[in-house]
Image (cartoon, rainbow, N blue to C red):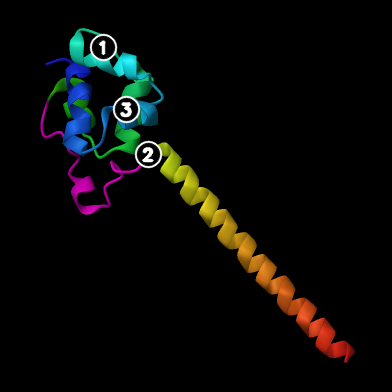
Amino acid sequence: MSIASRIAQLPGLLGIKNSEFAKALGISHQRFNQYKKKPETGVRYETINQIVEHYPVSEDWLRNGEGEWRRIESVVSEPTAMYTRSDFNMLDVLDRLSGVERRVSALEKKINNNNNDKT
């Protein structure tokens, strides 16, 4: 089985839609479909690295078909397969908003303290 064939299997193994998987990797849906239809399709080095970095997938399995598809350490950790890049972007935005909210709250307290000192 080729690297492209193994990549084509991943959305099913990870429990996500093909389109979500392709989008998270920054490849077109058409390119992903090529992996399914033409197993001999070449796969960019960057695509392989993105898969291994963002999903609990064994690099040995992906590159060579050796061992289990899922990284052993990822069985214990939280699976990221259900999250897309936009989900992580949204979490970053929410984290930033939380920091802004804390700063606003601190400023409101200062204003209230200043107003109380004046009276």
Question: For the residue marked with disc 2, what is the amino acid?
Answer: Thr
Counting from the top left corner in percent of width and height, residue 113 is at 78, 84
Helix, strand or loop at mark 2:
loop
Quickly name the residue at label 2.
84
Q: Are marks 1 and 3 in contact (CB under 8 Å)?
A: no
Quickly name the residue at label 1.
34
Q: Are marks 3 and 2 in contact (CB under 8 Å)?
A: no
Q: CA distance from mark 3 to mark 2?
A: 11 Å
Question: For the residue marked with disc 3, what is the amino acid?
Answer: Ser
Which circle's residue, 1 or 3, is located before the other in the chain?
Answer: 3
Which of the pair 65/83 is nearer the observer?
A: 83
- 75 drawn magenta: yes
Counting from the top left corner in percent of width and height, residue 50 is at 36, 29
The magenta region covers 66-83
Q: CA distance from mark 1 to mark 3?
A: 13 Å
In the rendered structure, the answer to whether residue 97 lies left or right of residue 29 reads right
Question: For the residue marked with disc 1, what is the amino acid?
Answer: Gln
Q: Main secondary structure of the magenta part?
A: loop
Q: Are marks 1 and 2 in contact (CB under 8 Å)?
A: no
In the rendered image, the quadrant that contains the C terminus is bottom right
Task: Give the residue displayed 21% in from the left and 22% down from the top.
Answer: 8
Which circle's residue, 1 or 2, is located before the other in the chain?
Answer: 1
Which circle's residue, 3 or 2, is located before the other in the chain?
Answer: 3
Task: Give the residue displayed 21% in from the left and 39% down from the top.
Answer: 15
Quickly name the residue at label 3.
19
Task: Give the residue displayed 30% in from the left and 32% down from the top.
Answer: 52
Decide: is 3 above or below 107: above
Decide: is 44 above or below 110: above
Counting from the top left corner in percent of width and height, residue 23 is at 38, 28
